Image (spheres, rainbow, N blue to C red):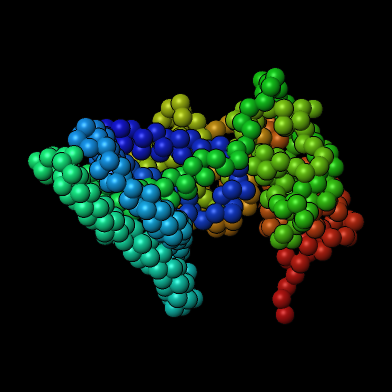
């Protein structure tokens, strides 16, 4: 049973890990990291422990009950039927208790996820909590979740613990009934006293495994609540990863066209109303506009993190829905404002963009991203281990590493979302030159708030409220004196 329970646990974790990669982005946008982690860790562990501890007891108890029943029937059928009369009463009482406690077990597992989620979130941003003196608010919220968890836990355990004494009480009623009937049958010479004594012993033994089953009901209920959450997670709607007769990415020239795209994260709120644009292969496209205009959303749609509600996005004339998702995303390289690096060496983090790359290629990519100099000054150079939060290097250095990763991947289409927002002005100029070399011959989408960085773009798309309100190169848009010109000039106005 230990072997079986561990195999089940292994299989569940494997399926959950694979499931995470098939889930759409909207699922993770609606859940905290802690809640997802709670399913992978707490719920699967609860299920594993319950299987390990209770299944052996269930098997031995059921086997014992069957064996004893056979012996009881062989001694006296009437006395056996009397002994079994108490089982419906037991089942009724246990059913009531299970129904009562199951609600609290489910709530316990759910709020364990909430508590984990808050701890993970607060621990990740504890500097911000301290800076804004948010300790009391955090503690208050934690106490609220913890109190709900506490109430659910003690109520579920309390109702479950009542089952054993209830079963013992009901079993004793049956025991008395059997003794009375046995006495009556003995007086009428229908059974021997020795048989009554044997039967009573069997009744005692019969009640023992039933009591044991009642005792482990709390573990079974906990496992049921955990398994419900696990299978609910495994049953979540998935992204379609592959399509029938997919379009090939071989020889793609990376021409991109947006045709009357409409999109909203929720059906009742459209944030991109009617977006159309044509991008030629190798063009450098800048997307600018105020916060909330829909710039990053356009990029998410391009990479199919979300699907458009209406309209279509074409790459070389193929609707992006006609590509397998994995093949489509191989065409893209991305550098985001929020850097993501994992626990491992700097060499491994840069190589994440191209697993088969040699050490020399990794170093060349780092040089192109102007990261080689600072890496060389680190204690172990390229073999330095980044910690879990990657906070043993600066924010600007993390940005350089993600840029090196994109350079190494050598993608057909490049997406830069505020890629130089965390570096100083001097480094930014250097990276801009490296980026210009990288972007030659590639279609590039650049989202920028600092408009000075995109003056040499082939095409600037000016967005506001989900629509393109202006497009053209820098000189044309300045000459128009419209929204872009006002936006550009406002960044260089002298303050009084």
Residue drawn at the location 22% of the way across and 37% of the way down? 76
> Closer to the camera, 62 or 416?
62
Residue drawn at the location 77% of the way across and 56% of the way down? 269
Q: Is residue 309 above or below residue 452?
A: above
Instruction: Evaluate whether residue 371 shows in this view.
Output: no
Rendered-image quadrant of the N terminus: top left
Quadrant position of residue 292 = bottom right
- Residue situated furthest right in the rendering: 480
Q: Position of residue 162 (x, y in %)?
A: 31, 61
Left or right: 113 with respect to 27?
left
Q: Is residue 143 above or below residue 95?
A: below
Left or right: 211 with respect to 439?
left
Residue drawn at the location 73% of the way across and 73% of the way down? 494
Quadrant position of residue 436 = top right
Q: Position of residue 326 (x, y in %)?
A: 59, 30
Q: Position of residue 201 (x, y in %)?
A: 14, 44
Instruction: Evaluate whether residue 89 shows in this view.
Output: yes
Rendered-image quadrant of the C terminus: bottom right
Q: Position of residue 116 (x, y in %)?
A: 42, 59
- How many marks overall? 0
- Residue situated furthest bottom in the rendering: 496
> Closer to the camera, 224 or 344?
224
Left or right: 198 with respect to 158?
left
> Closer to the camera, 369 or 110?
110
- Residue situated furthest left in the rendering: 194
Residue drawn at the location 79% of the way across and 51% of the way down? 272
């Amino acid at each position: 049973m230990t072997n079986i329970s561990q195999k089940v646990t292994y299989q569940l974790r494997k399926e959950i890990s694979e499931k995470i990669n098939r889930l759409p982005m909207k699922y993770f946008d609606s859940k905290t990291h802690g809640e997802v982690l709670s399913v992978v860790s707490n719920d699967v562990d609860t299920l594993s422990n319950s299987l390990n501890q209770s299944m052996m007891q269930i098997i031995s108890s059921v086997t014992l009950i069957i064996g004893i029943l056979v012996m009881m029937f062989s001694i006296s059928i009437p006395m056996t039927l009397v002994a079994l009369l108490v089982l419906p009463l037991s089942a009724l009482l246990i059913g009531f208790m299970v129904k009562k406690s199951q609600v609290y077990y489910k709530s316990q597992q759910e709020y364990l996820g909430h508590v984990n989620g808050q701890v993970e979130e607060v621990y990740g941003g504890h500097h911000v909590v301290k800076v804004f003196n948010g300790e009391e608010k955090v503690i208050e919220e934690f106490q609220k979740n913890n109190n709900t968890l506490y109430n659910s836990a003690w109520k579920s355990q309390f109702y479950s613990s009542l089952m054993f004494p209830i079963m013992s009480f009901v079993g004793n009623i049956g025991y008395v009934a059997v003794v009375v009937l046995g006495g009556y049958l003995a007086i009428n010479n229908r059974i021997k006293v020795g048989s009554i004594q044997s039967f009573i012993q069997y009744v005692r033994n019969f009640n023992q495994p039933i009591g044991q089953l009642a005792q482990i009901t709390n573990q079974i209920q906990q496992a049921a609540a955990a398994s419900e959450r696990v299978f609910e997670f495994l049953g979540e709607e998935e992204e379609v990863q592959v399509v029938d007769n997919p379009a090939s990415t071989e020889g793609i020239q990376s021409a991109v066209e947006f045709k009357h795209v409409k999109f909203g994260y929720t059906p009742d709120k459209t944030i991109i109303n009617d977006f159309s644009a044509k991008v030629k292969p190798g063009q450098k496209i800048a997307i600018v506009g105020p916060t909330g205009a829909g710039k990053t959303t356009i990029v998410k749609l391009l990479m199919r993190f979300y699907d458009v509600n209406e309209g279509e996005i074409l790459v070389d004339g193929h609707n992006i829905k006609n590509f397998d998702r994995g093949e489509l995303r191989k065409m893209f390289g991305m550098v985001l404002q929020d850097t993501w690096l994992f626990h491992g060496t700097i060499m491994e983090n840069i190589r994440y963009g191209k697993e088969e790359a040699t050490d020399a290629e990794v170093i060349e990519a780092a040089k192109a991203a102007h990261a080689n100099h600072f890496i060389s000054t680190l204690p172990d150079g390229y073999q330095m281990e980044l910690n879990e939060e990657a906070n043993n290097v600066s924010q600007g250095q993390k940005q350089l590493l993600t840029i090196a990763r994109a350079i190494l991947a050598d993608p057909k289409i490049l997406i830069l979302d505020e890629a130089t927002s965390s570096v100083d002005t001097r480094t930014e100029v250097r990276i801009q030159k490296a980026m210009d070399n990288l972007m030659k011959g590639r279609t590039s989408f650049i989202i920028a708030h600092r408009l000075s960085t995109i003056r040499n773009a082939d095409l600037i798309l000016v967005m506001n409220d989900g629509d393109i309100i202006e497009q053209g190169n820098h000189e044309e848009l300045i000459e128009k004196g419209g929204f872009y010109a006002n936006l550009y000039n406002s960044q260089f106005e002298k303050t009084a």
